[in-house]
Image (cartoon, rainbow, N blue to C red):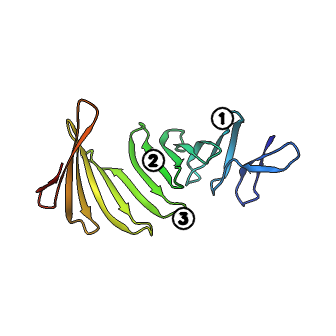
Amino acid sequence: GFVLQSERTGFAQIYLYDLEGKLIRNLTEGDQPVVDFYGYDEKTQRCYYAAKDGSPLHTAVFVRDEKGNTTTVSYDANDNKIGTSVTAKNADGTTTTTNYDANDKQFSSKTVNEQGKVLSESQKLDDGSTKTINYDENGNQTGYSITTETEKGAKVVDYDVNGKKIGSSDVLANQDGTLTVTSYDENNKKVSE
């Protein structure tokens, strides 16, 4: 086959054709115009390209596979790395995007369903803990949790949508590789182990 760049959607994108000129599939998509095409690896079915990323001043290098999984490395106008974003298509039809800073430290992630409704999102807080916001199938926030790593595991505190504590759990990693989870109610009374 062969690869061709076209603006058929209004934005410069890359398309894969068979030798008879029949479109096999788009290799890139979206509203970021492709500015450089580095190549297509038929064996891995990965496309390598550069596109504008949210701003005419920011260019990003993309690696995209046939499933739509994409790794994006963003740069500022002076070619300094801003960060990396990894978007994965999950087997259940959801898509998870995980974001990393310029030092490749994860700072947020988001999972959406096929309709684009947010199911969960998480972000690293300044104190090193992680806040995970949960949503129902309609995209309505149902609550959130704060997870803090401990010496032997993690402490998870759950809150309702209004920020009222509804429970917590201590998660301990055992030497045999199993986990012990102890759950508490909103008053820190043990409810299960």
In terms of secondary structure, where does tag 1 sit? loop
In this figure, what is the number of numbered marks? 3
Q: Are marks 1 and 3 in contact (CB under 8 Å)?
A: no
- Rounded to the nearest whole Å, what is the CA distance between mark 1 and mark 3? 28 Å
Q: Residue at 15%, 61% (x, y): give it.
A: 186
Look at the image and tell me in which quarter the N terminus lies.
top right
Q: Amino acid at mark 3?
A: Gln
CA neighbours of label 3 inside 10 A, class few (<14), some (14 to 19), many (20+): few
When asked about the image quadrant of residue 44, the answer is top right
Q: Amino acid at mark 2?
A: Thr
- Rounded to the nearest whole Å, what is the CA distance between mark 2 and mark 1? 22 Å
Asked if residue 104 lies left or right of residue 116, the reply is: left
Return the mark for residue 44.
1
Q: Position of residue 129 (x, y in %)?
A: 27, 47
Q: Residue at 39%, 43% (x, y): give it.
A: 106
Between discs 2 and 1, the one toward the N terminus: 1
Residue where numbered disc 2 is placed: 98
Q: Residue at 43%, 67% (x, y): give it.
A: 139
Residue where numbered disc 3 is placed: 115
Q: Nearer the viewer, residue 24 or 5?
A: 24
Q: Position of residue 63 (x, y in %)?
A: 60, 40
Between discs 2 and 3, the one toward the N terminus: 2
